[in-house]
Amino acid sequence: MKLLINEPSLQLLPTLVHQVGLNEAIFLQQLHYRSLISKDICGGEKWVYKTYEDWGKEFAFWSQNTIKRTIGRLEKKGYLISTAEYNERKNDQTKRYRINYSKLDISAEPGWVDGHNQDEPEELPTLGQPLFKELKEPQKENVGFRENEVVSITEYLNQVTGKRYKANAASTKRLLTARLNEGYTVDDFKRVIDLKASQWLQDEKFRNYLRPSTLFNATNFENYFNEEMPAQRKTEPFLSFELDFAKGER
């Protein structure tokens, strides 16, 4: 699709618009892009440090009041986290911003969430993409439902994580069936579950990502499947266990 004017454009995500609103969706997508290339890490988190005037250069079609109202609504609803506490000068009230990804109803978290080193991704989104893209008819991912395999995978996920996901949940069936129809096996699913559990299960911040919508999303699953399994995890499956403190020391 060709643009009417040859200039850099912003991305608009329809699903995000439905959740947070038009202006808010535009702002969050741009902040996501800026976060991916940010070098500003404070308190173990990536931030984007900008004044309202700086944001005005990003969104030249908005007034500064519109930018303030948009940011304020996102902060109030919990989608946006901001702070000025890391500024070197006490009188500097310029905020740092980051997205509260856990608040968003999305199936794929940003690439740098995987693991703990927050490395930059190899390929970053560009600002030169059309604001609107041609919409294609969504594919039906639940064609050829494979019940036994879906149940087996879901039970294994619950065994490893200690959670209680239901194999007959519509979203779980859709995601698992789609990946199975792409040629992945039950053992492939178990490998991904083991890998991400070894990275995230003991981490309070990341353990919530051990869920079907994150693990079995098309893009995420392929990336996780191609990650190198840690040496100690190559020869034995991941086993969850509980400590019985009533028995005392041995």
Image: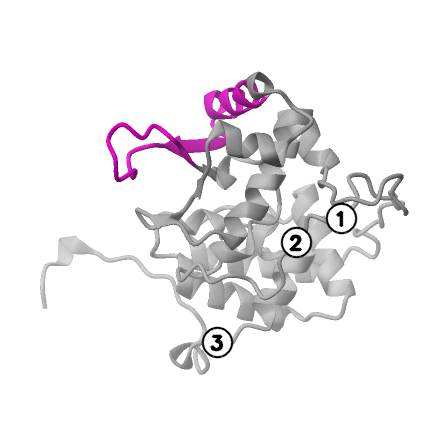
In the image, is residue 79 part of the stretch drawn in magenta?
Answer: yes
* The stretch drawn in magenta includes residue 170: no
Q: Which numbered disc, 1 or 3, marks the residue that appears first in the sequence?
A: 1
- Amino acid type at circle 2 is Pro
In screen coordinates, is 139 left or right of 170?
Answer: right
Q: Secondary structure at mark 3?
A: loop
Which amino acid does the dot numbered 3 rest on? Met
Comparing 92 with 187, the one in front is: 92
**Residue 189 in picture, x, y percent from top left:** 60, 66
Is residue 72 toward the left or the right of residue 11 in the image?
A: left
Q: Nearer the viewer, mark 1 or mark 3?
A: 1
From this view, report whether residue 158 is shown above or below residue 91.
below
CA distance separating discs 2 and 1 = 8 Å
Specify whether 141 is left or right of 115.
right
Q: Nearer the viewer, mark 2 or mark 3?
A: 2
Q: Which residue is mark 3?
A: 229
User: Residue tagged by mark 2?
Assistant: 125
